Image (cartoon, grey):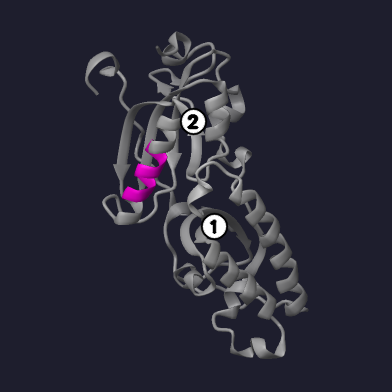
């Protein structure tokens, strides 16, 4: 970056992260003692999660991010048959999906059909049977190890590395729309964009923020993780990070 921030570069070591790789295996055949009750339970959880998702910064365009817990392995390639699009696998039994108001309605409808007689025609019902819960990617989920360990810097202004969900390929229309929407939101909130990395598997920003702006980022729909910048001595701390300690102007 030209000018005062030429010394700031987002340099992350290559990640070997199989959690975020698309998988298409069907896995084991999960059985539920009462599929209808299971579908009703998931539908109630979906209703609660949708209410939270609608209030998140960035969700004003009617698109939402949900967290699905599941048993065994999940057929990610056919999640779209139930109104949601696979985004990322974040743990052995957690995946993230992207959806819309129409997708939420379709997802809810399919859950309510699970286990009822007319539900015999429900395709890819094994995906729904494999689900254990529907929820939200929370503030705690977005906090990196460093943020959990050290907390946010106790300064008026400081620097954060903010990773967004890597929706589709780097130059795809959906990715470009996410970038445009997020950067317009940054501008509206007065957040300073210092640097950006946009690759197929990584969408990362370095931002200058204050405490209130950091809190908003930790609730933002498009944010996967909020991290403290690294230094040559390892993870930065509120008292030991050169860029954090100096703040930004």
Across the whole image, how many numbered discs are drawn on residues? 2
**Mark found first going from the N terminus, 2 or 1:** 1
Image quadrant holding the C terminus, namely: top left
x and y percentages locating residue 76 in the rendered image:
48, 67
x and y percentages locating residue 139 in the rendered image:
61, 38
What residue sits 55% from the left and 62% below the top? 101
x and y percentages locating residue 99 in the rendered image:
51, 60
| Front residue of this view, candidates 17 and 41 | 41
What residue sits 57% from the left and 72% below the top? 106
Residue 140 appears in the rendering: yes
Residue interval drawn in magenta = 176-183
Question: Which residue has dot 1 on it?
Answer: 95
| Front residue of this view, candidates 161 and 18 | 161
Asked if residue 7 is positioned above or below residue 68 in the image, the reply reads above
Q: Is residue 196 magenta?
A: no
Q: Which mark is residue 227?
A: 2
Left or right: 127 as drawn, with respect to 112: left
């Amino acid at each position: 970056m030209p000018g005062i921030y030429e010394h700031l570069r987002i340099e992350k070591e290559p990640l070997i992260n199989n959690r975020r790789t698309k998988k298409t295996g069907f896995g084991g055949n999960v059985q539920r003692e009462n599929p209808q009750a299971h579908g009703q339970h998931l539908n109630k959880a979906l209703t609660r999660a949708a209410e939270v998702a609608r209030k998140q910064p960035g969700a004003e365009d009617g698109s939402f991010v949900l967290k699905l817990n599941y048993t065994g392995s999940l057929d990610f390639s056919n999640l779209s048959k139930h109104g949601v699009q696979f985004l990322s696998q974040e743990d052995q039994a957690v995946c993230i999906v992207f959806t819309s108001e129409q997708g939420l309605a379709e997802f809810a409808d399919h859950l309510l059909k699970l286990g009822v007689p007319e539900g015999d025609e429900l395709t890819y019902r094994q995906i729904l049977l494999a689900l254990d819960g529907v929820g939200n990617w929370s503030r705690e989920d977005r906090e990196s190890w460093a943020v959990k360990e050290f907390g946010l810097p106790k300064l008026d202004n400081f620097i954060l590395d903010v990773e967004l969900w890597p929706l589709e390929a780097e130059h795809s229309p959906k990715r470009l729309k996410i970038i445009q929407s997020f950067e317009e939101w940054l501008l509206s909130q007065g957040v300073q964009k210092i640097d950006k990395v946009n690759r197929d598997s990584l969408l990362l920003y370095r931002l200058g923020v204050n405490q209130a702006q950091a809190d908003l980022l930790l609730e933002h729909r498009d944010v996967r993780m909020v991290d403290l910048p690294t230094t040559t001595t390892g993870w930065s701390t509120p008292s030991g990070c050169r860029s954090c300690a100096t703040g930004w102007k």
